[in-house]
Amino acid sequence: MFEQNYQQCSAGYYYLIRRGDTFYEIADLIGLPLDTLLRANPGVNPYRLMIGQRVCIPYVTGTLPLIKNIPVFVEGQTENREARLYRSDQGYYIYVLNNFTFTGEEPGRDLVFSNFDSRFDARIEMLPLNADINEIRKNSIVELQYVGTPVEMKGEEIFDPFFRKAAFFLHSSSSTLSKNIILIRIGNNLFRFTVSIPNTEAAEGLGPSIYAMLKTIFV
């Protein structure tokens, strides 16, 4: 997938401009000097970028990849799917799959959701490492009671080994919705993920995609 859509250019790889992209924001996001990006695209007017326009992202040591493939485990198989780098106003980075939207929902909380069905979503909150875990657990249990009876999952009850290191993994479900609240340490911060997965056929693909994106978060 990556090779088909983002072939090598002389200095790096090609990227297709998306809504809202600017050269300044791309360079700032990946840690690339703006002049280097401009020199790699001598025929491109940076003030007239168009959606779908192909630009060259040069390889420079120490920069972050703007586009990369991330593993998504679906129906017993791992698929590598293309994702784009985003930076939250909270200060962390995340790779977001195509056909998903990442946005700041309110100060201190972000939202990633499916463009096919926005009910499939995850709310992301970055908390200080000294936050009161017991208080967060209590509040999370209260929130989950609106869906069903909360259950704390542990060990192999948690489907993905990555999330087994969580401070807690709470689950609740009804006939129409499954909801998980996860508190996990990443770097020097705690992250609270609230994941909503409607009980539909689409859950087989969209649910794993959401968890795959959460696993890419770094600070």
Image: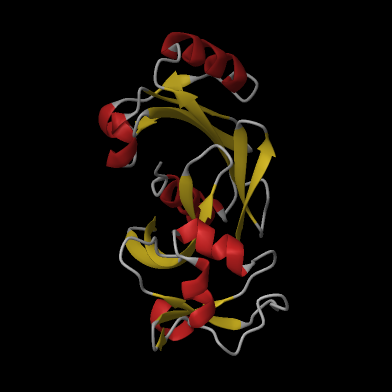
Q: Residue 100 in the image: state x and y as whole percent.
A: 59, 57
Question: Residue visible at 33% across and 62% down?
Answer: 78
Left/right placement of residue 84 relative to residue 72 reads right
Question: Residue visible at 41% across and 41% down?
Answer: 219
Q: Residue 124 in the image: state x and y as whole percent.
A: 54, 36
Q: Residue 88 in the image: state x and y as whole percent.
A: 56, 44
Picture quarter containing residue 73?
bottom left
- Identify the coloring: secondary structure
Left/right placement of residue 210 relative to residue 79 reads right
Picture quarter containing residue 154?
top left
Number of marks in picture:
0
Foreground residue among 106 and 205: 106
Foreground residue among 24 and 133: 24
Q: Residue 60 in the image: state x and y as whole percent.
A: 35, 70
104 shown above or below 132: below
24 shown above or below 184: below
Question: Residue visible at 33% across and 58% down?
Answer: 76
Picture quarter containing residue 38?
bottom right
* Quadrant of the snapshot with the N terminus: bottom left
Question: Residue visible at 34% across and 40% down?
Answer: 159
Foreground residue among 188 and 184: 188
Can residue 110 be seen from the camera position used here? yes
Can residue 197 be seen from the camera position used here? no
38 shown above or below 95: below
